Amino acid sequence: MTEVSTITVCVLNDPVIYVYWVSQGKKWCDLCKIFINNSPSSIRNHELGQRHKENVTKRIANMRDEKVAKDKEKKETARVLSQIEEKASRSYQKDISTFQNATSVGAPTSSEGTEWEHDTSSGYYYCKSNGCYYDPNSGFYYTDALGKWVTQEEAFAAAAKHSSGPIQKKPTFATPSLTSKSQNDSKAQRSTVNPTRSVNKPSSLAINKRKRPDNKSKVISEEEAAALKAREAARKRVEEREKSSLGLYKHWYVTTHYFLFEKLVKSMSWKSGAGNERLFK
């Protein structure tokens, strides 16, 4: 479809009429995915059609479903975040109360009447009767039977099973700093993973190294043996072929250079040429 357009141009007060053809563009319907004529009547007729109305209804339903899904996802995310925050808050309050109780009490108390002494070098409390350590900052206990920091009940139960009598010797160790200190303090106190391990004790990683089994002759098939034999023969052929180029098995390199040097000396006009010729006789 084309239409005729006219433009009137005034040149020297004389009207001049130019007539030319203009191509009419198409209009794209995003719902129906088709092109229609770009005229009011064509657009109106297309919008009143049954196909276009069904596409509009379908698009509105899809938009409504997407909005409901987004709202549901937002509510679920908010619920999960609230649960995480609530759990973290409870854990934080529990840690704060434990820390405050441990700091206020200082040395631990026990119903068994154990005596605790404070070690100034490590900052922990030590019990001679069961050999447990107590950290007032964290509120945990350490025993040789478990080898890790645990609660009071676990430490005392493990210590009772580990040894029935009192511990005669207290191991010395460097305690890790639990709070932020200066650089000099951190250099003075070197922390170790196991506090009861002696300084000069060899590491368990360096003992009982795994030994590799002896290399035994494997049983190979006839095809594999033939392939190995052919590869060895090819290697020898290549070696024989490259011997001459390497210059390691023949003296042609030295002989040729000696001959060239002799020829050069004879060709030079030296005053004592007769004496030099004797060198090559």
Image: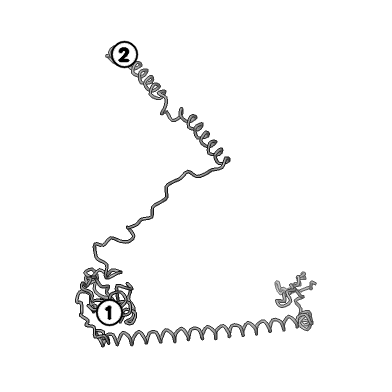
Color scheme of the displayed model: one colour
Image-quadrant location for residue 155: bottom left
Callout 1 secondary element: loop
Quarter placement of the C terminus: top left
The kind of residue tagged 1 is Asp
Residue 255 lies, with reference to residue 48, above or below; the image says above
Q: Which of the two discs, 2 and 1, labels the residue nearer the N terminus?
A: 1
Task: Tell me, for residue 135, which label it has, or none.
Answer: 1
Where residue 110 sits in the image (x, y, percent)?
27, 86
Quarter placement of the N terminus: bottom right
Residue 12 lies, with reference to residue 59, above or below; the image says above
Write the residue at 25% across / 87% down. Answer: 105
Q: Looking at this view, is 97 or 117 the one in front? A: 117
Are the residues at dot 2 and dot 1 in contact (C-beta closer than 8 Å)?
no
The kind of residue tagged 2 is Glu
Callout 2 secondary element: helix
Task: Tell me, for residue 277, which label it has, or none.
Answer: 2
Task: Tell me, for residue 100, which label it has, or none.
Answer: none
Write the residue at 76% across / 75% down. Answer: 36
Write the residue at 71% across / 78% down. Answer: 31
Residue 161 lies, with reference to residue 110, above or below; the image says above
